[in-house]
Image (cartoon, rainbow, N blue to C red):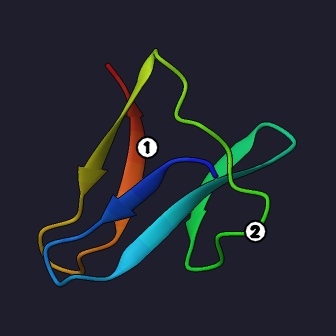
Amino acid sequence: MGFEYTNSRGVKYYLHKRGPLLFFSKDPADSIDLPERLEVKENPRTGLPMVKKK
């Protein structure tokens, strides 16, 4: 199982990769681990997670 993030509203998201694109999905299948150079931030208005460089 890959990286799992639970936002402030209690919704679980899983990290995925398609080509150079990293994105979060509610589907745990084929999720990947979070690379060390990146961190997760949450949009305070929508609660959606984002991947950013450290």
Q: Residue furthest right?
A: 19
Residue beneath disc 1: 51
Give the amino acid type for the residue marked by disc 1 in the picture: Val
User: In the picture, residue 44 is in which quadrant?
Assistant: bottom left
- Residue at horizontal 22%, vertical 82%? 10
User: In the picture, residue 51 is in which quadrant?
Assistant: top left
x%, y% of residue 28?
Answer: 65, 70
- Residue at horizontal 75%, vertical 68%? 29
- Residue at horizontal 23%, vertical 59%? 42
Task: Mark 2 vs mark 1: give the one in front.
Answer: 2
Viewed as shown, does residue 43 lie left or right of 52? left
- For disc 1, the neighbor class at 10 Å (few under 14, some 14 to 19, many from 20) is some
- Residue at horizontal 72%, vertical 46%? 21
Q: Quadrant of the C terminus?
A: top left
What's the CA distance linking mark 2 and mark 1? 19 Å
Q: How many marks?
A: 2
- For disc 2, the neighbor class at 10 Å (few under 14, some 14 to 19, many from 20) is few
Residue beneath disc 2: 29
x%, y% of residue 6?
Answer: 29, 67
Viewed as shown, does residue 1 lie left or right of 13? right
The label number, if any, that marks residue 12 in the structure image: none
Image height of 50 relative to 32, above or below: below
N-terminal-most mark, 2 or 1: 2
Give the amino acid type for the residue marked by disc 2 in the picture: Ala
x%, y% of residue 25?
Answer: 59, 72
Viewed as shown, does residue 45 lie left or right of 28? left
